[in-house]
Amino acid sequence: MQIEGLEQYRKAGKIASQAREFGIGLIKAGASLSEVTEKIERKILDLGGELAFPTQVSLNDVAAHYCATPDDEKVFSEGDLVKLDLGVHIDGYVADTAITIDLSKDGKHEKLVNAAKEALQNAIKSVKPGVRTAEIGRMIQDSISKYGFAPVRNLGGHGVGRFTVHGPPSIPNYDNGDDTIIEEGMVFAIEPFASTGAGIVYERDDANVFMLTGKKPVRNMMTRSVMKEIEGFNGLPFTERWLVRKGMSLPKINFALKEIDNLGILRKFPPLPDKNNGLVSQAEHTVIVTKDGCEVTTE
Ligand code: CO
């Protein structure tokens, strides 16, 4: 079967996995979240990739969507449980991958980290044409429950496409009864999250990950110049740091984002902690469904 963008998906996957491994080496107690994030994103660009979404480092009970701000003073601490989630695209074709790093000295998060990792491995093994997405979800749920943890039910895997990070099919982290069938040629990310808490996440604090969802005329000159840069992200998620990198000041960026938000064309992705403040681990790979299984692009 001919898959549109196959070589680009593979190249994006390879760069994403190299950047992920590079990132693991940087995430240490005392390191700054914003510096580490900048270095990982620089690495992706140096390897010839483009950023499919802002690199995120979410700590402890936060499952996802913590993205360092330009003036972020947070540093990693000993004992932290860190989810590194990054995305690369080549000519729009996306690779999405994540891993959890245990910064405890005594490996106290090991079981939780392994639960998400094993769930991902088992899910990947179960992918082939004809399988229902709910069956993949059941595989994830069973793997995580076996460890005594809860799968995060309101987060899940997602189809990726050209300049699309979140499309169909949805790959649930539990058996949600959905009848969607996996087909050859589908490209999607699988991302089990294991929690010691509720296994439900909610939106907390201000977002630093944004996405433009439409086009509207902008009168203000300052906002218009920021908008022009944002349009260059081709509808993919972005963050304030990317605009600072383009030479804009933070007050100008924040002013413009507020204006764009008021126009109703800015989607915001706030950090997602567990409802009961449980610790959360994550593992994620992007796969291409083949005739009798799948190819992992971010291995
Ligand atoms: Co993802």
Image (tube, rainbow, N blue to C red):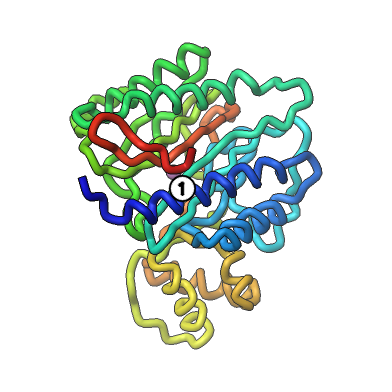
Secondary structure category for the residue under label 1: helix
For this rendering, which residue is in front, 108 or 51?
51
8 lies left or right of 4: right
Q: Residue at x 30, y 30 (%)?
A: 293
- Horizontal and vertical percent for residue 10? 41, 49
* Ligand 1 under 8 Å from disc 1 Cβ: no
Q: Which image quarter: residue 241?
A: bottom right
- Horizontal and vertical percent for residue 161? 32, 53
For this rendering, which residue is in front, 131 or 72?
131
244 lies left or right of 182: right
Label 1 crowding class (10 Å Cα cut-off): few <14, some 14-19, many 20+?
many
Q: Residue at x 68, y 30 (%)?
A: 102
Q: Residue at x 29, y 38 (%)?
A: 289
- Horizontal and vertical percent for residue 217? 35, 82
Quadrant of the frame with the N terminus = top left
For this rendering, which residue is in front, 30 or 279?
30
Say what amino acid the circle numbered 1 marks. Answer: Gly
- Horizontal and vertical percent for residue 101? 65, 34
For this rendering, which residue is in front, 113 or 211?
113
Q: Is residue 196 visible?
A: no
Q: Which image quarter: residue 153?
A: top left
Q: Which image quarter: residue 152?
A: top left
Would you name the residue on which mark 1 appears? 13
Q: Is residue 50 visible?
A: yes
